[in-house]
Amino acid sequence: ETGVTQSPTHLIKTRGQQVTLRCSSQSGHNTVSWYQQALGQGPQFIFQYYREEENGRGNFPPRFSGLQFPNYSSELNVNALELDDSALYLCASSLPSGGANTGELFFGEGSRLTVL
Amino acid sequence: AQSVTQPDIHITVSEGASLELRCNYSYGATPYLFWYVQSPGQGLQLLLKYFSGDTLVQGIKGFEAEFKRSQSSFNLRKPSVHWSDAAEYFCAVENQAGTALIFGKGTTLSVSS
C-alpha cells in the first residue's frame, strides 16, 4: 500500500472536452509529480509541484495544467482534449530531491483516460 | 539529452531460471539510476536505485542491478525467477534538474512453468 490515491480510476471523454484528475499524496510527502503513460510506453513526465508551486515541467503543452493544495494533494487539468491524450495518468508523491530519498517516487494506480 | 533504452520489449523466462533485463542510459554526469516494476492494474514500485559507491546494488524481492559506467548500463538481475515476477519493468534515470525521472519504454517479463 503506497498511500497515493487517484480518482477517478477510469473515465471516458470526447475530443475538445476538459478533464480534471485528482491525487492525494502519501502522508508526509510534499512533492507531487504527474506522468502520462501511453499504451506500450514508459511514463513521461508532465510536471512536478512542490509547496504549491510548479517545480519542473516536461514537454507538454500549456493545456496541461495543475494545482497543488496546502494539504499537498494535487489536480491535473487537461483542456481541449485530443485523441492522443488517451493514456494512463500516474501521480507520484515524494520527498524533495536530495539525500537518500532522491528519486524514490511512490505511485498511485493511475487514472485511465479514454478520449473518443 | 538524457535518455534510457531498454532493448528487450518482451522476455520469457522459465520459473526458477535466472533473469537479466538490460538497460542503457545516456547522461553526461554521474547518473542516478532506478528500476521500477509495474504489475497489471498497479502503480509503479521501486525495486532498487543507484546513486554512487558500490556498483552492485541490492533491491527488494531478490533483485540486484550492476552499474557499469564504461558500458553506460544498469542491468537488472535475479538468480531464480518466480511466477509472481511476471510484470512490466522500467529502468529510469533522474534528470539533471532533479525534478523528474526519464523512463525507458519498459520490458515485459513473462514467466513460464
Image (tube, rainbow, N blue to C red):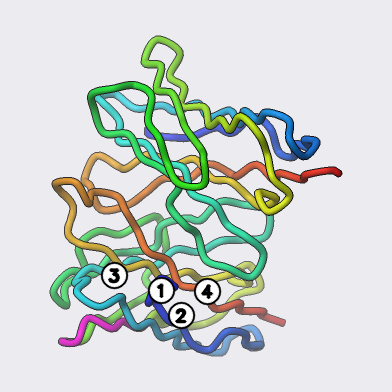
Q: Earlier in the sequence, mark 4 or mark 3?
A: 3
The local crowd at label 1, few if under 14, some if 14 to 19, many if 20 or more residues have their Cα within 10 Å, is some
- For disc 2, the marked residue is A78
Q: Amino acid at mark 3?
A: Val
Q: CA distance from mark 3 to mark 2?
A: 17 Å
Vertical order, B28 against A93 (above or below): above
Q: Residue at x 58, y 68 (%)?
A: B42
Q: Earlier in the sequence, mark 3 or mark 2?
A: 3
- Would you say A53 lies left or right of B31 here? left
Q: Main secondary structure of the magenta part?
A: loop
The local crowd at label 4, few if under 14, some if 14 to 19, many if 20 or more residues have their Cα within 10 Å, is many
User: Where in the figure is residue A42, as x and y percent of width and height?
Assistant: 56, 51
- For disc 4, the marked residue is A110
Residues at discs 3 and 2 both on one chain: yes
Vertical order, A48 against B79 (above or below): below
- For disc 3, the marked residue is A32
Q: CA distance from mark 2 to mark 1?
A: 5 Å
Residues at discs 2 and 1 both on one chain: yes
Q: Earlier in the sequence, mark 2 or mark 1?
A: 1
User: Where in the figure is residue B58, as x and y percent of width and height?
Assistant: 40, 35
Helix or strand or loop: what does disc 3 sit on?
strand
**Of labels 3 and 2, the one closer to you:** 3
- Would you say A35 lies left or right of B38 here? left
- For disc 1, the marked residue is A64
Q: Are marks 2 and 1 in contact (CB under 8 Å)?
A: yes
